[in-house]
Amino acid sequence: MPNYGKSIAAALLAALTAVHTMLSDDVITQQEGVQIAIAAVTAVSVWLVPILAYAWLKTAVATILAVLNVLATLIVGGIDHGDLVQLALSALTVLAVGAAPARSDAPPTPTPMARHSL
């Protein structure tokens, strides 16, 4: 958990988003498909982004994608009860990613010799 907490939190909430979408009305609309895709991209992005010099970068990525989820919801069909839960899950994802522990080391910089051996 200390190394992958942020990624685990984002992945769990992406799965919860997908499950909620499927169970809420037994139909996945285009809007809900976009919400699931954004949740999945959030989980993958949080895992891929190394901290480097900015410890807040994983949380920033989760925040940007949560805002995208809100915009997709507002633009496509407005907000109903199911959407409120989805938006709450987006906000919870940001909070969970921000609070979860993680240690990401920047990948080593390739040496000139290593670049030529690829």
Image (spheres, helix red, strand yellow):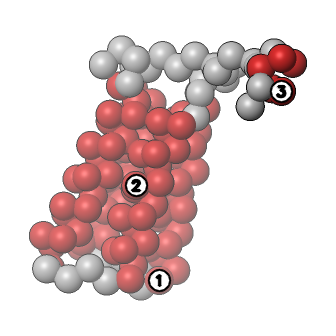
Q: Quadrant of residue 117?
A: top right
Q: Quadrant of residue 22?
A: bottom left
Q: In which quadrant is the C terminus drawn?
A: top right
Q: Quadrant of residue 31?
A: bottom left
Q: Disc 1 and disc 3: Cα gap in Å?
A: 48 Å
- Residue 40 bears which disc, if any? 2
Q: Does residue 100 appear in the picture of this structure?
A: no
Q: Are marks 3 and 2 in contact (CB under 8 Å)?
A: no
The secondary element bearing badge 3 is classed as helix
User: Type of residue at label 1?
Assistant: Val
Residue 29 vs residue 74, the one in the foreground: 29
Horizontal and vertical percent position of residue 40: 40, 55
Q: Is residue 96 above or below residue 3?
A: below
Q: Does residue 33 appear in the picture of this structure?
A: yes
- Residue 76 bears which disc, if any? 1
Q: Is residue 111 above or below residue 8?
A: above
Q: Disc 2 and disc 1: Cα gap in Å?
A: 19 Å
Residue at the spot 39% in from the left edge and 34% down from the top edge: 7
Q: Nearer the viewer, mark 3 or mark 2?
A: 3
The residue pinned by badge 3 equals 116
Q: In which quadrant is the N terminus drawn?
A: top left
Horizontal and vertical percent position of residue 70: 47, 64
- Identify the mark nearer the N-term, 1 or 3: 1
User: Type of residue at label 3?
Assistant: His
